[in-house]
Image (cartoon, coloured by chain):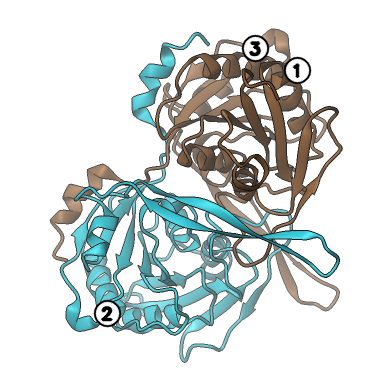
Chain colours: A cyan, B brown
Amino acid sequence: MSPKRPLILITNDDGISSKGIKALLEAVKEFGDIVVVAPDSAQSGMGHAITINEPLRLSPSRLFDEVTAYSCSGTPVDCVKLGVYEVLHRKPDLVLSGINHGANTSSNVLYSGTMSAAVEAAMEGIPSVGFSLCNFDSDADFSASISVVKNVVSQVLVHEMMARTCLNVNIPDVSIGDLKEIKICRQAHAFWEDRFDKREDQFGKPYYWLTGEFLEQDKAEDTDLYWIDKGHPTIVPTQFDMTSYKSIKELENWDL
Amino acid sequence: MSPKRPLILITNDDGISSKGIKALLEAVKEFGDIVVVAPDSAQSGMGHAITINEPLRLSPSRLFDEVTAYSCSGTPVDCVKLGVYEVLHRKPDLVLSGINHGANTSSNVLYSGTMSAAVEAAMEGIPSVGFSLCNFDSDADFSASISVVKNVVSQVLVHEMMARTCLNVNIPDVSIGDLKEIKICRQAHAFWEDRFDKREDQFGKPYYWLTGEFLEQDKAEDTDLYWIDKGHPTIVPTQFDMTSYKSIKELENWDL
């Protein structure tokens, strides 16, 4: 690899054979030398999970022409750790995750394997971005997403990323001609009101599928949900200090 | 159940048969009516993972005398969701998670199944606390932890929990007589420098165990790591808005 071109590690959570990771690779191959380390199967909803109670497998993949790629038995966060410490043996210049099939707006960032991979990179001091298209279809059209990825990555490469921060980029499900300007936002407050679909197996024993409804309680104009609904790509700068600073003083008044 | 006693949902990430969850139950049974929904096996490191690609199992457990309990095939976050929506069919008054076998200080909160269960409860508007003992031993001594749990839970029940906040309580591995006062802290900046232990299976194919070293870069006096090292239990009030507000203005200067 040329020493002048940035080294870009790519991962995702939909698995190495998904359409979204191929679209991400196509979008950024002009910007640097690419190495892919991605899950061998779908890892949606894995959040910041790591694999500590079983060993990990890492297998060379020939899915992408002229790109070094490995599939991994673990989670997206495992892929970043294996990519940095076992495949590259150095920090890459950039970690990119996605393009996710489905939105990672609002508090979904906490459940998202795509974003957890980006957060993991940020924790290790590596600039990183997670990309998500607001369409769950496995054959979704990534044309508009590719345009947004090129725009964002070209800017990441000329700016210094803010310390301990990564970018959460969501792209509305629109055609490339209908793309509006990118909006910088905060994470909306919203949550899933869960339901479980209870069924019985062939032995009469119950099992449950997680389902539910997304409750958008926060429609403020500075949120990702507000702008995505209006057809704008959104960027939420994302950090990983979960301290509630404003609660510290209140807690100090408790009789602990 | 008496309508006057608070309804407390208990979960953990070490599994329903761990010593830590039994210690938690013993500590709080005087405070309310308890229902346990906990993983059927160890779920350490699962972070905020949810199970969406396979169904969940939920089985009555007779592990605890006079307490309704279920073991669940899923993650700690799944346990909270199943507990609220499928077992209780209402929000409990309090969700408690732990007592974890091992510290969840610093940025380990992101990997922690124990804390992710507490965060999930907070996202659903339920007061919640995660407890962790700084000792990984499966037969650790929880005497000091039980004392801290009683102290914290009694205070949570008389105060209104701050909105969208839960408590991350870490307890040093000391005897009950050596317990010092509880300190309210922020999450320290620290991270794992990973390594992988590479081995070969019986067919000569490689596999990897995740290992590593915890790098404490942040020894400031307002952090959980600082006080845990000095033998104090710590509480970090924990929220789930991951927006980096201070980066929003900087990003607005990028040429996006």
Kindly identify the residue that appears in the image at 53 percent across and 11 percent down: A256
- The chain identifier of the residue carrying mark 2 reads A
Which quarter of the rendered picture does the C terminus of chain B lie within? Answer: bottom left
Residue under numbered circle 3: B179
Q: Residue A35: image x %, image y %?
A: 47, 76
Q: Nearer the viewer, residue B202 or A240?
A: A240
Residue assigned mark 1: B143
Disc 3 marks a residue whose amino acid type is Leu
Name the quarter where the N terminus of chain B is drawn: top right
Q: Name the front one of labels 2 and 3.
A: 2
Instruction: Please state which amino acid type lies under the numbered disc 1.
Output: Ser
- Crowding at mark 2 (Cα within 10 Å: few <14, some 14-19, many 20+): some
Indicate the position of residue B108 as horizontal and vertical percent values. Answer: 55, 41
Q: Quadrant of residue A115?
A: bottom left
Let me know if marks 2 and 3 both belong to one chain: no
| Chain letter for the residue marked with disc 1 in the picture | B
Contact flag, marks 1 and 2 (Cβ < 8 Å): no
Q: Nearer the viewer, mark 1 or mark 3?
A: 1
* Residue B59, visible in the rendered structure: yes
Give the CA separation, mark 2 to mark 3. Answer: 58 Å
Disc 3 crowd rating (10 Å Cα; few below 14, some 14-19, many 20+) is: some
Report which quarter residue B147 is drawn in: top right
Q: Write down the residue under mark 2.
A: A144
Determine whether, in the image, residue A107 is placed left or right of residue B150.
Answer: left
Q: Is residue B232 visible?
A: no
User: Callout 1: few (<14), some (14-19), or many (20+) C-alpha neighbours within 10 Å?
Assistant: some
The disc, 1 or 3, on the residue closer to the chain's N-terminal end is: 1
Which residue is depicted at the point 76% across and 43% down? Answer: B70
Residue A18: image location, x then y, percent: 50, 80
Looking at the rendered structure, the secondary structure element under dot 3 is loop
Apparent side of residue B108 relative to residue A129 in the rendered image (left or right): right
Asked if badge 1 and badge 2 are on a common chain, one would say no
